Amino acid sequence: MAAEPLLSVRGLRVEFGSHRGLLTAVDGIDFDVREGEVLGLAGESGSGKSMTLRSLLRLVKAPGQVSGQALWRGRDLLALPEAEMRRVRGREIAMIFQEPMTALNPVLTVGTQIRENLKEHTELDAAARKARAIELLDHVGIPSAKSRVEDYPHQFSGGMRQRAMIAIALAAKPRLLLADEPTTALDVTIQDQILKLLLRLRSELRMSVILVTHDLGVIAQSCDRLVVMYAGQVVETGPVAALFAQPRHAYTLGLLNSVPRAGAVRQPLASIPGQPPSLLELPKGCAFAPRCRFAIAACGGNRPPLVEVGPEHFSSCLRHRDVANR
Amino acid sequence: MALAIPTVRRRRQQRLRMPLIIGLGIVVVLLVLAVFPGSIAPYDPRSMDYTALMHPPSASHPFGTDNLGRDVLSRVIWATRVDLQIAIFCTIFPIIFGTTIGALVGYYGGVLDTVFGRIVDITIIIPFLVLVIAIVAALGPGLLNMYIAVSLIGWVFYAKIMRAEIQVQKESDYAAAARVLGYSEARIIFRHLLPNAITPIIVYWMTDMALDILLGSSLGYLGLGAQPPTAEWGVLIADAKNFMSTAWWMSIFPGIGIVLAGLGFSLVGDGIADIFRRQR
Amino acid sequence: MTAMPDAAAPLMIVDALSKSFVRRGSFVDRIKQGGSKTVRALHDVSLVVRRGETLGIVGESGCGKSTLARCLVRLHRPDGGRIVYAGQDVLALAGAERRTYNRRVQMVFQDPYGSLNPRMSVRQMLAEAILFHRLRKGAAVNQRIAELLELVRLPTDAADRYPHEFSGGQRQRIGIARALAVEPECLIADELVSSLDVSVQAQIINLLLELQERLHLTVLFIAHDLRLVRHISHRVAVMYLGSIVELAETERLFTKPAHPYTAALLKAAPELDPARRSVVEAVRGELPSPLDVPPGCPFHPRCPKVFDRCRVELPLLRERAAGHVAACHL
């Protein structure tokens, strides 16, 4: 019997009212995050993965409307008064972003930004905050932390900036880290360093992580469980090993096949034809059906629910058995 | 990504287009007044009726009469032609010459840029109005000299804008693609870069026209622009300056003309900027 | 189709190409440090591109691969070295001969949103290229445009639309069509699919493979995605801080890399197999800046196998096996 999940999202919906109609960025999704796990949130542009993350921390402003429930240690994040939400942000749940240069304040030193977080969320006094800032920078792998703590973000290189951003985010030892494409803008060798750093910190701080990315390799190397999103809907979720070995949704299968594997050199890749649908006019039923080679008439009917297809493995594909046997 | 929001634009487009439509409406009305003053104005702007001196607005004189018995409405209508002429002639040379120079300077840089920088410095140091007045004073009052004075200085501002825009567009990948396709530099500058750089110029042009009308009116007020008895809004206000409290209609209506013209051009400029912005 | 094209036919020879950019510091920098800094983008780069092959060029930020691509199409003027294309010295070409070279070697750019002129319709873009180079006249132009659109699998009604009406993947197709409009022999793809979603990447890569077969194109595929490069290249060159550190046939490079940087790069790239994970970093240290190139071997500050000679002497490309060169003292 699995332990009570740390975060339990039910019916999360993010919509943008426009005069042409309703743009549905996230179409009523459910998922859980367990203690100490790295949950991958995968999907391409327009899948709603970034919007999901932002809505958890109530960063989505009008005209966006968020509805649903996000139970965090018993409290619904989406219903909390703003003052309490501020206490959750940074102290219990932290977030890091894709572009460190825009996420870090360019006119404040890195040390100041860390200390700001500590001041807001901990009881440490000024001297202790100073010391902790240096300690944090050192911990995330920035050499000569003592001198670098008074540097400005632009004085750091890309990878170092990401580390600084992680240090700021983790200053108050949050239980959950939301990572929105933290390595997408980085070079391969630096990406590798940052991912390994995140995993190490996850173990040390006994923290959970929701990692949003479109890179299947990153997911394979760092996530325990995976939620695959398409056009604002969850199409498949389960342990990473199971999903990669035997995907049970046509979209997941298509995605995995789009990535070249060694062996079939210069052969055409099995690409998914067409394009993702407009978020203003989501197709009835399964959003992926128009592009799906397994689609049957029923796929265009009611939206298929997530059903259990294996141990802890859920899929919303009506033809998941055929997909498994492809 | 881009595919997701193609039609959100439609309603927003309609909302944003209202100002443009209003602006265009105003400009069209002004143009009609400028082109057909004779058919629209009820009286000859120069004819004086000594029996109707400084009459307030009435049925026979909707805008009243001035201190010489002339119908204010007719004078305001005839003045539209002069003021629109001012708007056009004060900007036509600057926009053509300034855009070309700015494009060349922006693209080639180097020595050209240094020289141009110095010209800009000289031009900015002295306030525009003072400079124009100085030149007009040297050349003599009158509209033609005003056009010359404004053109001599005004082109620099267009050139500055164009230079900055071209410098940005020059670095884009589509400009690089054009170079890789072997196109000549003239073609790249004028066929590829310029259309992408022109929007701020057009917007500035609209504002410039509005400001030049104001300038013309200011000079007219000072006696350095249009000379009486020519009806020009500034001249009309100047004529009215001694009668501000006794005959408010002599200055208010030309004033409204200036405001309307300024508003019309500004709205058109903003509207155009929006349209081009949405095409990105 | 997967066999190596005939090794005997070099199409382009790059010889000792060097390029530096002088970065004029801000006014404050100049007072403080007395001057401008030199960014060493390319240093002594030599390679041979064979007719009909796909040569992959990989490397991280600052390695010079984009600068190299731009030098090859004459967007940058190299400071030293030569480029020889079909026997001609490319850098000496001028006028009509240069335009002919532009026709033969074309480039497709990374950013689908910046590489198309927002003010020109697809038809205008393609027609301009065709007419400027006098490839067709009159009614044949529109026919050719239809052909090009068909080649890149875009609907014919795309011709009269503007770039902002298309998605990223479609814009890349238009970019390819524009490059193909002048009937090139060699296509340089500078991070062609890096800005696209995974599923769209696959579509474009398939298109590229197909076009290469149909039109007998030679392709220089510049990318940072190792998996893609491995999939479509015959040979791969690895660049680091402005130099080529290794060059070999694809499978050999990926299975038996001779340079420690190549090995690190391969190790760092996240594998698709969740069962094979490691906690050890592939390589330590930061990416170096081309403003500040270390003496000796540029990789030595981060190299796990560094020894004394590496710190002082720059290693040259040495042949390790047939067709496999690497610049390492090991």
Image (tube, coloured by chain):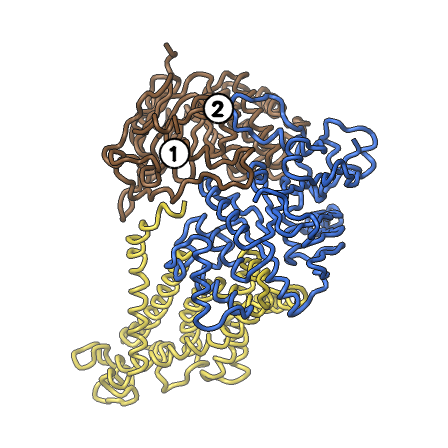
Q: Which residue is painted at 55% across and 82% down in the image?
A: B138
Q: Are marks 2 and 1 in contact (CB under 8 Å)?
A: no
Q: Quadrant of residue A72?
A: top left
**Residue C199 in sight:** yes
Q: Position of residue B88 (x, y in %)?
A: 42, 77
User: Are discs 2 and 1 located on one and the same chain?
Assistant: yes
Vertical order, B268 against A109 (above or below): below
Question: Which chain is drawn using brown?
Answer: A
- Give x and y (percent) for residue C17: 73, 51
For badge 1, the amino acid type reads Tyr
In the displayed structure image, the side of residue B13 where residue C52 appears, left or right = right
Q: Which residue is mark 2?
A: A223
What is chain C's hue in the picture? blue
- The number of numbered discs placed on residues in the rendered structure image is 2
Circle 2 or circle 1, nearest the eye: 1
Name the quarter where the N terminus of chain B is drawn: top left
From what the image shows, is residue A223 above or below residue C161?
Answer: above
Which quadrant holds residue A112? top right
Q: Image quadrant for the C terminus of chain B? A: bottom left
Percent x, y for residue A196? 57, 24
Mark 2 residue type:
Cys
Q: Position of residue A121 (x, y in %)?
A: 47, 22
Q: Nearer the viewer, residue A261 or A242?
A: A261
Residue marked by disc 1: A251
Q: Colour of chain B?
A: yellow
Q: Is residue B184 shown left or right of residue A173? A: right
- Asked if residue A59 can be seen in this view, the reply is no
The mark that comes first in sequence, 2 or 1, is 2
Q: Along the line of sight, which residue is nearer the eye, B259 or B17?
A: B17
C32 and A175: which one is in front?
A: A175
